Amino acid sequence: MEFKSYVGMGNLCFGMTEDEVHAVMGDLPRKFMKSQQSKHTTDAFPKRGVHVYYTETGRCEAIELFPPAAFRWNGRDLFDLPANEARSILAATDPSLVDELSGFVSFALGLPAVLCG
């Protein structure tokens, strides 16, 4: 799925309702509570490698990808790259990329976390 800064991933857009997400994904998800602090269920699409998180009012607020999904940025699948190479590609657009234990964060790109191996 192609990442679009502050818009979403592929055809999934932040702000979509659950029904809109389900229509884009083409199937019904497995719903679960991500943590005890969760205020809303998370939609899991395991065959696609996608989790969709919602606000308390049921609007998409975050999209998490993991294999077998592709995480594309400017046509390149960042999941296929070593973490340092993926970081360099994103840092070329956002020199103020912030390193964290789990990866890195780009506030300029609207990318809250990138977990790379």
Image: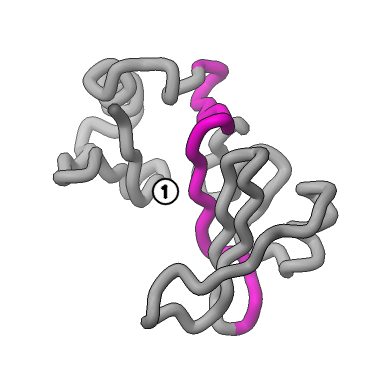
- Residue 65 in the magenta stretch? The answer is yes
What colouring style does the render use? one colour
Q: Residue at x 16, y 45 (%)?
A: 100
Q: Position of residue 53 (x, y in %)?
A: 54, 64
Q: Nearer the viewer, residue 27 or 108?
A: 27
Q: Position of residue 93 (x, y in %)?
A: 35, 27
In the structure shown, which secondary structural element does the residue marked by tag 1 occupy? Answer: loop
From the image, which quarter does the C terminus lie in? top left
From the image, which quarter does the N terminus lie in? top right
Residue type, mark 1 in image: Gly
Residue at label 1? Answer: 110
Q: Residue at x 58, y 40 (%)?
A: 49
User: Which quadrant of the view contains residue 14?
Assistant: bottom right
Q: Residue at x 53, y 26 (%)?
A: 72
Q: Is residue 25 above or below residue 30?
A: above
Name the side, left or right, on which 90 lies relative to 1: left
Q: Which residues are magenta?
A: 57-76
Name the side, left or right, on which 74 lies relative to 111: right
Q: Residue at x 84, y 55 (%)?
A: 23
Q: Is residue 76 above or below residue 61?
A: above
User: Which quadrant of the view contains residue 38?
Assistant: bottom left
Q: Position of residue 42 (x, y in %)?
A: 57, 66
